[in-house]
């Protein structure tokens, strides 16, 4: 049978086409969108995916949690290996393993073998190097083939999301899709004819900026000072080295934090600043492999700021309780640069489509990062006349993939 797979940087969904239209598959009890996360147990070949992977990691099980594995596809890391305890595992194997467990779930749910896949892809896996972009798609295809999928086609994620608008249009519409996810911001403009039949892609564009970048700047500028980043070491008057805080703020590089060299450096910081609770907490975090928990708390703080003007980041270690209040305004200042990149990519799409913003009749918000009020406002102000649709931010891409005929 045939399925559409939205393999997102943060979350993954799968949909099939039924008589009633596209339907999302329940990938875990009650969940049609699961975290793109994989947890390898140490000392065995066993692994888990989705929220089970995160729960196992949080329960303190020995092993390694990996997230944002999609971003590796378009980078030089895709041909490299990553260390899991004593063994080195190729990154492409990690993606293949994730897809294997995902396909198994779908097969259990549908009772059918999956042989045909319409695979979503960002408009660009790498916005500066077309060769890496092509390689990323090839590797993703190979990972599916290795799991027994014989018929694979690819479709850009925002174009897939636009497919779900088909039946809803009344009269001719110009629809602009803004898909702001965890790893990328993708745009496309389509013309839909009133009969629901005509579907013309006018333009598309993408940029490697998304919610993960929001987490990264929030962590580095607002939260790491609580862990000693801006301190001067008490006994030698040297500034705390910043490189390790850069690692802490980036999911993809967390494994480097646990290297002997970093541990040695943190021990050195502790020695020369024995009274700093922040440096003690940083040491505790690294010693207890809690960078993943730190990142989740950072993301949760960001998500809270979509609802409230202020939030608090909390990290408790034996004998110390770190707490940092964060204002929405401070967060918005930090993401201003990312918003400029998004806005300019959106403009590239309009230019390619030959459209003026006033011609856009509908704007569809897709992807979790469109919940950030500053992101939503950015597009509201760019398209003053457009009607906004924002009711299927996590499911539209997978459903549109299932709808696509090739
Ligand atoms: N309420 C919220 N406020 C702010 N950000 C949110 C909210 N909910 C989810 N996010 C963010 O949205 C991102 C995930 O969105 P989504 O699931 O659409 O991405 P994805 O499809 O996995 O990624 P991509 O399409 O870039 O590969 C994460 O960065 C997450 O922190
Ligand atoms: Mg997405």
Image: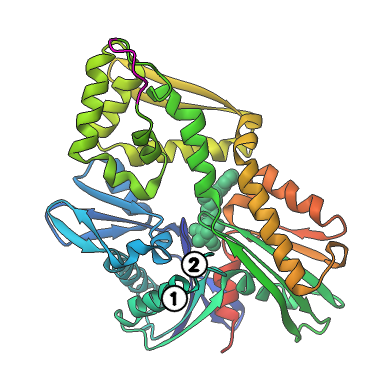
Q: Choose between 199 and 222: the one closer to the eye.
A: 222
Residue occupying the point 42% across, 72% down: 136
Q: Secondary structure at mark 1?
A: helix
Up the image or down, 203 lies above or below 112; here it is above
Q: Is residue 181 left or right of residue 250?
A: right
Q: Disc 2 on helix, strand or loop?
A: loop
On the rendered image, what quadrant is the C terminus found in?
bottom right
Q: Are marks 2 and 1 in contact (CB under 8 Å)?
A: yes
Which numbered marker is on residue 194? none
What secondary structure is the stretch in magenta mostly built from? loop
Is 239 covered by the magenta stretch? yes
Q: Which residues are magenta?
A: 235-240
Looking at the image, tell me whether mark 2 or mark 1 is earlier in sequence order: 2
Which is more toward the observer, 152 or 394? 152
Ligand 2 image position (quadrant): bottom right
Q: Which residue is mark 1?
A: 137
Asked if one can make out residue 205 in the rendered structure from this viewpoint, the answer is yes
Q: Quadrant of residue 246?
A: top left
x and y, in percent, of residue 328 in the image: 63, 31
């Amino acid at each position: 049978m045939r399925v559409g797979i939205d393999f997102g940087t943060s979350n993954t969904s799968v949909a099939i086409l039924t008589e009633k239209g596209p339907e999302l598959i329940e990938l875990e009890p009650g969940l049609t969108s699961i975290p793109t996360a994989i947890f390898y147990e140490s000392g065995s070949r066993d692994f888990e995916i989705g929220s089970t992977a995160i729960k196992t990691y949080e329960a303190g099980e020995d092993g390694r949690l990996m997230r944002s594995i999609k971003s590796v596809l378009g980078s030089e890391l895709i041909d490299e290996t990553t260390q899991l305890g004593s063994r080195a595992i190729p990154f492409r194997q990690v993606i293949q393993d994730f897809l294997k467990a995902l396909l198994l779930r779908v097969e259990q749910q549908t009772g059918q073998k999956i042989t045909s896949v319409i695979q979503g892809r960002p408009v660009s896996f790498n916005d500066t190097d077309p060769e890496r972009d092509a390689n990323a798609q090839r590797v993703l295809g190979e990972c599916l083939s290795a799991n027994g999928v014989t018929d694979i086609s690819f479709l850009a994620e925002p174009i897939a999301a636009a497919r779900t608008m088909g039946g809803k249009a009344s009269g001719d519409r110009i629809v602009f899709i803004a898909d702001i996810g965890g790893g990328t911001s993708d745009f496309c403009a389509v013309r839909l004819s009133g009969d629901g039949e005509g579907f013309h892609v006018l333009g598309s564009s993408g940029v490697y900026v998304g919610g993960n970048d929001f987490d990264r700047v929030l962590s580095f500028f607002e939260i790491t000072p609580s862990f000693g980043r801006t301190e001067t070491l008490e006994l030698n008057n040297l500034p705390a080295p910043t490189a390790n805080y850069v690692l802490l703020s980036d999911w993809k590089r967390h494994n480097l934090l646990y290297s002997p060299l970093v541990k040695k450096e943190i021990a050195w910081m502790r020695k020369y600043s024995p009274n700093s609770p922040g440096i003690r907490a940083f040491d505790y975090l690294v010693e207890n492999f809690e960078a993943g928990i730190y990142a989740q708390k950072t993301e949760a703080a960001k998500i809270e700021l979509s609802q409230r003007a202020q939030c608090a980041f909390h990290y408790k270690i034996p004998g110390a309780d770190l707490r940092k209040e964060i204002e929405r305004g401070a967060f918005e200042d930090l993401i201003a640069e990312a918003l400029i990149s998004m806005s300019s990519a959106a403009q590239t799409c309009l230019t390619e489509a030959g459209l003026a913003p006033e011609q856009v009749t509908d704007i569809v918000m897709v992807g979790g990062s469109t919940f950030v009020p500053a992101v939503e406002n950015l597009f509201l102000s760019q398209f003053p006349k457009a009607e906004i649709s924002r009711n299927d931010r996590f499911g539209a891409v997978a459903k549109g993939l299932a709808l696509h005929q090739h």
